[in-house]
Image (cartoon, grey):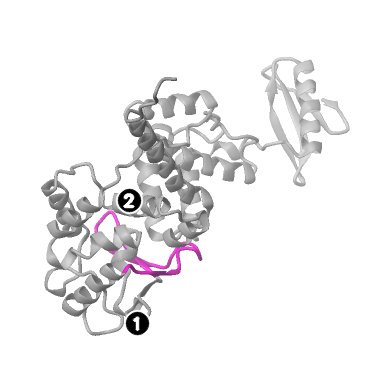
Amino acid sequence: MTRRHFGSVRKRPSGRWQTLFWQDERVQSAGTFATKADAQAFLSALETDLRRGKWIDPRGGEVTLCDYANAWLIQRTELAERTVELYRHVLSNHILIALGTSTVTGLSPTKIRSWHANIAKDHPATASKAYRLLSSIMRTAIIDGIILSSPCKVEGAGTEHAAERPIASAEEVELLSRAMPDHLRIVVPLATWCQLRRGEILGLRRMDVDLKQHVIHILQSRTFGMDGKQIMKLPKTDAGRRTIFVPRPVMKSLVRHVEIFAGPEPEALVVVGRGGANLSRDALQGSWERARLAIGGPDLRLHDMRHTGLTLAAATGATTAELMHRAGHASAPAALRYQHATRDRDQRLSDALEGMIHVPED
């Protein structure tokens, strides 16, 4: 055996040279090599990495991505129930099905790039979501000391390039509202002119509607799990918990709606199913689909009504801060999207006017 200050190398009966070193109060082996020189060179490099804090115990990376990712998700106790459900779905259907049997250290940039490209060719949005989730898991693996750097190095892979959503006209908003069942008619103006998210509309209670001040208080939201189960939750951010003024025509419709459809209790939900029953996800979606088809807008989503309302608010000259408050945004970039959309429309208007201009020749 050849001894060094840091560790030692010894020749095995097989003829290969084994490296040994002292770490965590015990002797560890870093593998075997064909020659003594190779073993000593590796031991020197290992000593340098240890002193710099850059050594990774190779045994830690032997865990499969499937085991590590599932443990990672279980430990994320701060995540909302719906978020955990979505993460579980993306993991099972798009990440682990292709990469789950690989060890964490066995994930290379080449392997990740090929996996992402395979999904992105048909489902680019899904590929972006899956890549962002995998990147987050790999960042935790770095913190845990399993890997030194993330294999997720595909530039722009986590960015979604969604097409600009359509903006409904004021006439279409009115037609959509009329095409909805009477007990759901209020959903359209609340989404458009109050810029509420679907979950915020469904979570609105009688006690949240201030008829005297003409405001509504956004204090909770109601969503649905993939199995259709109802989930009540608080806003994600302080910005989401807000009070907004309601345009008078909308407030008039809201008062009528509450009087007819909402229960008398302060906690009674404003938007309910037929006969006051709990409104299911499928019932709302089915009513919306029939309404949009009735007005000839098959591409319109319910969320596009919120998008429409915020874009129109930007067109009135609303500042970024005002849009952020109205929409419940915690950051400026989201609100700036609507101001950008307004500038785009202004450019198209200018181009249309251009053809009407006649400049007399000198």
Query: Residue at horizontal 47%, vertical 62%?
Result: 325
Element under disc 1: loop
Give the x, y percent position of residue 216: 36, 73
Query: Residue at horizontal 50%, vertical 50%?
Result: 72
Q: Which residue is the site of mark 1?
A: 212
Element under disc 2: helix
Q: Which mark is residue 308?
A: 2
On whether residue 243 falls in the magenta region, the answer is: yes
In the rendered image of this protein, does residue 46 appear above or below residue 235?
A: above
Badges 1 and 2: C-beta atoms under 8 Å apart? no
Out of 260 and 49, give the one closest to the viewer: 260
Residue 277 appears anywhere in the view: yes
Give the residues drawn in magenta, as a range. Answer: 220-247
In the drawing, does residue 96 fall left or right of residue 287? Answer: right
In the drawing, does residue 115 fall left or right of residue 183? Answer: right
Q: How many marks?
A: 2
Other-residue count near label 2 (Cα within 10 Å), few / some / many at <14 / 14–19 / ≥20: many
Q: Amino acid at mark 1?
A: Lys
Mark 1 or 2 closer to N-term? 1
Query: Residue at horizontal 46%, vertical 55%?
Result: 74
Out of 222 and 307, give the one closest to the viewer: 307
On whether residue 233 falls in the magenta region, the answer is: yes
Give the x, y percent position of residue 281: 22, 58
Give the x, y percent position of residue 3: 86, 28
Out of 196 and 61, give the one closest to the viewer: 196
Q: Amino acid at mark 2?
A: Thr
In the rendered image of this protein, does residue 91 appear above or below residue 319?
A: above
Which residue is farthest right? Answer: 5
In the drawing, does residue 297 fall left or right of residue 17? Answer: left
Give the x, y percent position of residue 280: 20, 62
Which residue is farthest front? Answer: 362
Report the Cα–Cα distance between label 1 and label 2: 27 Å
